[in-house]
Image: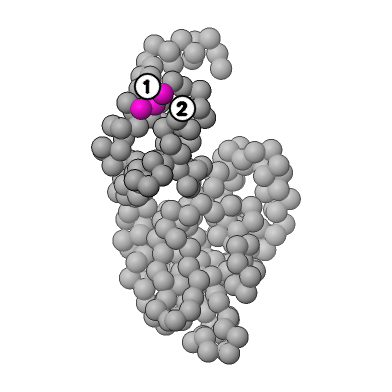
Amino acid sequence: MTEKSTKSRSAYAAPALERGFDILELLATMPAGLTISEIAQQLGRSMSEVFRVTIVMERRGWLRKDPQSDHYSVSYWMLDVAYRATPARSLATVAAPVMQSLVSATNQSCHLVVRAEARGLVVQRIENLGPAGFAMRAGAVIDLVTSCSGHVLLAFADDAQRDAIIAAQPADAAAAIRKLRPHLAVVRAQGYEMSPSARASGVTDISVPIFAFGGAITAALTVPYLEMIDGSQRTDLVATREMLMAAGAAISESLGASSGPRRPD
């Protein structure tokens, strides 16, 4: 960091606000939450500094307190604000009825993933109504390197987008993405990715791109296909893939992308 940028940063410092961001970022990595003393210890702050900010954030709904353990954790209000303030809202609004039709036809769950800096983020999911199924929760973070959705987001990104993704990754993940280039070319050519789930045994993930106005990829629509032991699934893997591709094309068209596959040169 340059001397000029350091001076500029200190000139516009807002210590209480920065402490609030520090607390949010810390608790985002602690699903079980932390007590105020644990937060202070982790951040190297005094109890009084952390206490005041934490109480205000709880009162405003950004944090929730477990009355049994006194652990604070990030509330769903944060996800709600992010959802309303970003393009994810219009994307999810357009995609929801198409996703619901897909779930009704296949009896398989599906979810929508967007890129959030160096990772993927589930912004919408529709669960199947059968007695058994597999679904990702909204707000789940997706690894771009190992996930089916991530491969689609990477494969259909243009060079500038992909360079930005690589630049945001740790060195080992950036190197892994570079090694994926030949496989990403295959994904781009066939228009989808299909692979065993990186999270659950017995699940095959199928993912297709969603394009926005102008043809840039904006999301990946994914079905975690669960094949039942008794063969009672409504549609087979191939039929589900074809329905998923049709759903992806329909959402893309509704977002203003012209019909037909949109692939970067």
For residue 206, above or below residue 18: below
Residue lying at 71% horizontally and 48% vertically, measured from the top left: 176
> What's the colour scheme?
one colour
Q: Residue at x 35, y 43 (%)?
A: 65
Q: Is residue 50 within the magenta segment? A: yes
Residue type at numbered disc 2: Ala
Res. 251 in view = no
Where disc 2 sits, the SS reads helix
Amino acid type shown at disc 1: Ser
Whichever of callouts 1 and 2 sits on the residue coming sooner in the sequence is 2
Q: Quadrant where the C terminus lies?
A: bottom right
State the residue position of label 1. 48
Q: Residue furthest left?
A: 59
Disc 1 crowd rating (10 Å Cα; few below 14, some 14-19, many 20+) is few
The image shows residue 257 at horizontal and vertical percentages of 41, 60
Q: 60 or 245: which is nearer to us?
A: 60
How many numbered badges does the structure rendering display?
2
x and y percent of residue 222 in the render?
51, 66
Q: Residue at x 32, y 55 (%)?
A: 90
Figure quadrant of residue 170 = top right
Q: Which residues are magenta?
A: 47-51
* Residue 184 percent location from the top left of the image: 66, 58
Q: Residue at x 54, y 47 (%)?
A: 119
**Could you say which disc has been placed on residue 40 in the image?**
2
Magenta highlight: main SS: helix
Which is more toward the observer, 239 or 205? 205
Q: Residue furthest front?
A: 68
